[in-house]
Amino acid sequence: AILREEPAHEFLGGSFTAADLWLYQRSDLNELLDMEMTFSEIVPSAPFVINIHTGTAEVTAIAIDPSEGQLTIDRTHSGIKEFHPAFAASSRHAAPLRIANGILKIRFLLDTSSLEIFAQDGEIALTDLIFPSAGKRSIGLSSEGGSALSMPRVDRITIYKLRSAVLEE
């Protein structure tokens, strides 16, 4: 069965700031999401973050560090994590990331308790458990100390609402 619901939300390209504003205007996204983003003109001196907001003061961060060649998931503030000390202690997971010609393609799937990330057409795959509050989702972009002029261009964003894979009676 196809889980993606049409129509998709689509951003057809622009500055990092314009993309963040476009995302901000979609602050009532579904709990289950399939999102694809393409960035270009990435420079080593300008790390950035894709923030997935899931509730009041709840955020899961996907950090891109071009100079270190690293993608990191930070679930420190992603929701419930106090149920086991080992879960709370392992809140950051990183993978090597190759950025060729200043381009990054990233896709993530978000459901009620997991985040799956695929970067560079599946060259990198990371999966993490998160336990956020129920409700609407929002996405934002932020810089990690780089200037607005050094932020990458956002060539495209596509956001699909997903149907649950659980069969309803």
Image (spheres, rainbow, N blue to C red):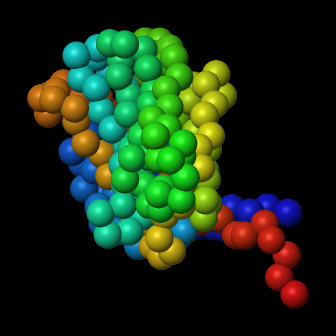
Q: State left or right for residue 75 relative to residue 16.
A: right
Identity of the residue drawn at 32% across and 69% down: 56
Which is more toward the observer, 90 or 32?
Answer: 90
Which is more toward the observer, 154 or 83?
Answer: 83
Which is more toward the observer, 32 or 92?
Answer: 92
Rendering coords of residue 71 (x, y %): 45, 27
Q: Quadrant of residue 34 in the image? A: bottom right
Identity of the residue drawn at 74% across and 63% down: 3
Rendering coords of residue 117 (x, y %): 58, 39
Above or below, comparing residue 134 to residue 45 in the picture: below
Above or below, comparing residue 96 to residue 109 in the picture: above
Q: Give the residue at the far bottom of this rendering.
A: 169
Identity of the residue drawn at 50% across and 47% down: 85
Rendered-image quadrant of the N terminus? bottom right
Residue 121 appears in the rendering: no
Q: State left or right for residue 112 relative to residue 85.
A: right
Rendered-image quadrant of the C terminus? bottom right
Q: Give the residue at the far front of this rendering.
A: 85
Above or below, comparing residue 132 to residue 110 in the picture: below
Identity of the residue drawn at 28% across and 17% down: 43
Rendering coords of residue 50 (x, y %): 37, 43
Q: State left or right for residue 58 relative to residue 17.
A: right
How many marks the image carries: the answer is 0
Q: Quadrant of residue 146 in the image? A: top left
Rendering coords of residue 141 (x, y %): 30, 45
